[in-house]
Image (cartoon, rainbow, N blue to C red):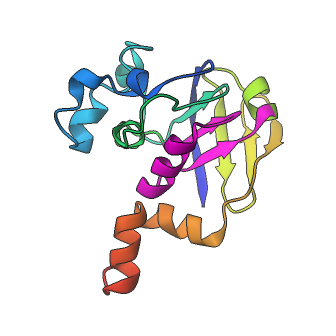
Amino acid sequence: MILKGFVHKYGANVNTDEIIPARYLNTSEPKELAKYCMEDIDKDFVKNVKAGDIIVADRNFGCGSSREHAPIAIKAAGISAVIAKSFARIFFRNAINIGLPILESEEAVDAIEKGDKIEIDLANGLIKNLTKKQNYKAQPFPEFMQKLIKFGGLLPYIKGTKTGGK
């Protein structure tokens, strides 16, 4: 699976309350959560994000509470993947569960800048900076995780493979 988009870049320790503030957690409707994604850290994020764009961040992305609303808001806002030096463990699991690709690559985070256009090959763990004409490596996504992403997450995957859904 190949993903391509422009970069929105953030620092270290972006927490789940910055990704989707608690004041908006009265719903779990993805489109509603997307309206407020990153609001407390980047007021213009929702105005600037385009379908397919990619978040690049420093260490410990998604720290804080265990709310699965955070990766849901990111995905619903149009982000196709998140690249960081590291992720909070619960955010990592929640992202996989909802089919949001996340990759760890210190070299990519250090080199990629806001606004760069990048391409990600999930099967090979290759991150290409199309703006700077540079390549970086991340851990490739195993085939089963690529299927989870293709199906839109764990629940649609289980329904699709176990109960005959498409």
Please provide the residue range marked out in magenta: 80-106
Q: Quadrant of residue 85?
A: top right
In the rendering, at what x and y percent does residue 31 appear?
24, 40
Q: Quadrant of residue 81?
A: top right
Rendered position, 60 above or below 138: above
Residue found 70% across the figure and 42% down from its top:
104
Give the side of residue 34 with respect to residue 85, left or right. left
Residue found 75% across the figure and 42% down from its top:
128
In the rendering, at what x and y percent does residue 103 appear?
66, 45
Rendered position, 3 above or below 155: above
In the rendering, at what x and y percent does residue 7 appear?
58, 29
Toward the viewer: 140 or 6?
140
Quarter in which the N terminus is drawn: bottom right
Give the side of residue 34 with respect to residue 151, left or right. left
In the rendering, at what x and y percent does residue 122 appear?
66, 57
> Does residue 27 belong to the magenta stretch?
no
